[in-house]
Image (cartoon, rainbow, N blue to C red):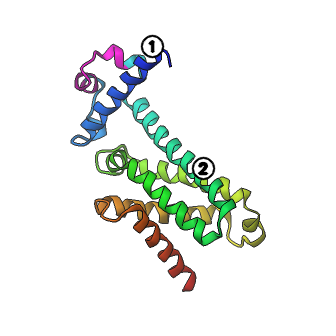
């Protein structure tokens, strides 16, 4: 990475960190670019070299979060779908995914909380739904046994999983990722037996 690219990356990280600090105590709607720049100890012009406005900043940060979690899901799905039975693979996949979510919790707490921009929950669910959809479309068993329309299945899976994540975050991550994976599997098992 060149010196210029490294400097740009560090400046963007500083802007993002400053923005996240502000979101911990102040709603998104009331934050201004001037305040972000002041907190980052730079002028507004430097901010505008990297972002169009605060909406662009937040959108890029959300998109990066979705991409990070999505690539993690892709990697895990490809590893476990080949190596294990469904149950084993599913629990290991869930544990690794909960570890990834744990890593992103500082941002998720803010984005899912009262100070984040309205609609994050929906954007997060939609990003998760696209990942689930792409994997289901590749699964021959789903097409052979699929009795539930895809859009309803995606809505159920993603809303349930997102609800589990939100509860875990609200409870202060009192359970380890492995405990959350076991809980997730117990819930799935409970639903299947009903």
Label 1, residues with CA under 10 Å away: few <14, some 14-19, many ≥20: few
Which residue is rendered at x = 30% and y = 38% of the image?
28
Which residue is rendered at x = 54% and y = 48% of the image?
72
Q: Is residue 148 above or below residue 28?
A: below
Q: Secondary structure at mark 2?
A: helix
* Residue 156 seen: no
Q: Is residue 165 magenta?
A: no
Which residue is rendered at x = 37% and y = 63% of the image?
176
Task: Compare residues 181 and 47 and report the one nearer the observer.
Answer: 181
Q: Secondary structure at mark 1?
A: helix
Task: Compare residues 2 and 28 and report the one nearer the observer.
Answer: 2
Q: Is residue 40 above or below residue 43?
A: below
Percent across and percent down for residue 108 are: 37, 49
Residue that extends furthest to the bottom in the rendered view of this protein = 194
Please give left or right for residue 116 compared with residue 138 in the image.
left
Task: Specify start and end residues of the magenta stretch as a single range.
Answer: 35-47
Dot 2 or dot 1: first in sequence order is 1
Percent across and percent down for residue 122 are: 47, 52
Percent across and percent down for residue 137 are: 72, 57
Q: Is residue 37 magenta?
A: yes
In terms of image quadrants, where is residue 183?
bottom left
Task: Compare residues 95 and 147 and report the one nearer the observer.
Answer: 95
Label 2, residues with CA under 10 Å away: few <14, some 14-19, many ≥20: few
Which residue is rendered at x = 43% and y = 36% of the image?
61
User: Residues under labels 2 and 1: Cα distance?
Assistant: 31 Å
* Residue 27 seen: yes
Percent across and percent down for residue 152 are: 61, 65
Q: Check disc 2 and report the residue beneath it.
A: 75
Q: Which labelled disc corresponds to residue 4?
A: 1
């Amino acid at each position: 990475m060149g010196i210029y690219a490294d400097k740009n990356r560090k400046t963007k990280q500083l802007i993002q960190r400053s923005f996240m600090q502000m979101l911990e105590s102040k709603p998104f709607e009331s934050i201004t670019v001037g305040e972000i720049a002041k907190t980052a100890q730079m002028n507004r012009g430097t901010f505008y070299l990297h972002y169009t406005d605060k909406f662009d900043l937040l959108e890029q940060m959300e998109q990066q979060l979705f991409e990070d979690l999505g690539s993690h899901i892709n990697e895990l799905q490809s590893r476990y779908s080949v190596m294990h039975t469904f149950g084993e693979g599913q629990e290991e996949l869930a544990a690794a995914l909960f570890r990834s979510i744990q890593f992103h919790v500082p941002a998720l707490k803010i984005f899912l909380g009262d100070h984040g921009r309205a609609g994050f929950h929906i954007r997060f669910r939609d990003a998760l739904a696209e990942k689930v959809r792409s994997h289901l479309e590749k699964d021959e068993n789903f097409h052979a046994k699929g009795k539930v329309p895809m859009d309803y299945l995606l809505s159920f899976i993603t809303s349930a999983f997102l609800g589990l994540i939100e509860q875990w975050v609200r409870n202060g991550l009192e359970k380890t990722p492995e405990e959350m994976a076991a809980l997730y599997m117990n819930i799935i098992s409970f639903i299947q037996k009903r």
